[in-house]
Amino acid sequence: MKPFRSSLILSVALLGATVAWAQFGGLDLGKLKKGLDTAKDAGKVLKGVTGIGPEEERNMGEAVALELIGKYGGLVRDDDIMQRVNLVGRTLGRYSDRPQLNWRFAVLDSDTINAFSAPDGYVFITKALYDQAPTDDLLAAILAHEIAHITGKHALNIVARNDAFGALTKQVSERSGTTRNIEGTLRQLNLSTDLILKTLLEKGFDPQTEYAADLTGHNLARTCGYAPGGLRAVLVHLQETGADAHKTFSTHPPLAERIKRLPDEPAPAPAAPDAKDQPAGEAK
């Protein structure tokens, strides 16, 4: 392991990257849902919202995260898996363009090969895709792509550009009265959640946005000491194995096009075999 990467992993570990499956990145899912419900109270909802600030992003992220968890089989109940994705993911998040976010990573119990991101630092990878990343170099490449969507505020930009959201924002700003502000803000939250979920699950980001996330993620993984050819290796492997197109990055551009646009770099070294799987006398 490279010294730079060792120091990064150690520093992130000391920050508490280890988490149990029941606590998604240190955030209890029950409390997350309760927080959304509490946001309906007058004291918790912003008044006179103008644009998308940290509070709006936080609420959107929580709402989208809960929807994704429910749609894709819940979280994988494996402490080692959750610990690994948060260790690698938080290393990347700390050296991303938005290190101040409370980055949270989890594996969804789904046989669909895909990954998702939600505003405010939520990153998900399905179990089927996680199984295609036996080394940290490959896992980091996948997570870094999703981190790039969040640092680039790609989902938030879609919401902000939406005419209906802009009209709601103006109404909330102009109207007086706590009740109207609360109702308007909740409508904003519902609309923004629907827009983001439709993008993630149905339409997908436009191809240029995905290619940009590939490149930004590639650079982030390399900055943190992971092999730069990780994402290309994952995509090539999926292409070579003939993964079901309906279950593989269904909202992303074609694998061949993504591969063509990435630097032609060697694949990372394969995972070393476990000592317990080696013949007696050959374990190192």
Image (cartoon, helix red, strand yellow):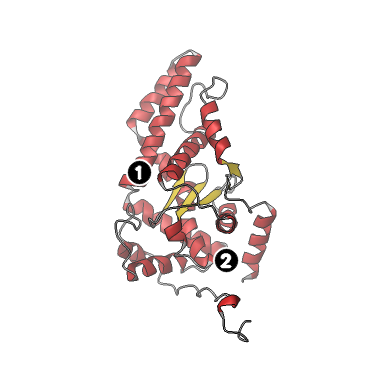
Q: Which percent across, then down, holds residue 55? A: 53, 32
> Height in image: 105 above or below 267?
above
Mark 1 residue element: helix
* Residue 141 place in picture, x, y as percent: 48, 62
Three-letter amino acid code of the residue under disc 2? Gly
The quarter of the displayed image where residue 275 is located: bottom right
Residue 248 image offset from top left, x and y in percent: 34, 58
Can you see residue 24? no
Q: Nearer the viewer, mark 1 or mark 2?
A: 1
Please tell me which residue is depicted at 52% across the width and 59% down the height of the picture: 220
Query: Which residue: 44% across, 25% down?
Result: 186
Q: Is residue 249 above or below residue 203?
A: below
Q: Nearer the viewer, residue 216 or 192?
A: 192
Residue located beneath label 1 in the image = 199
Mark 1 crowd level (few <14, some 14–19, many ≥20, 10 Å Cα): some
Q: For the residues marked 1 and 2, what is the alpha-carbon distance in whole angstroms?
A: 31 Å
Residue at the extreme bottom: 281
Q: Is residue 200 left or right of residue 218?
A: left
Element at badge 2? loop
Identify residue for label 2. 225
130 relative to 16, above or below: below
Along the polypeptide, which appears first: circle 1 or circle 2? Answer: 1
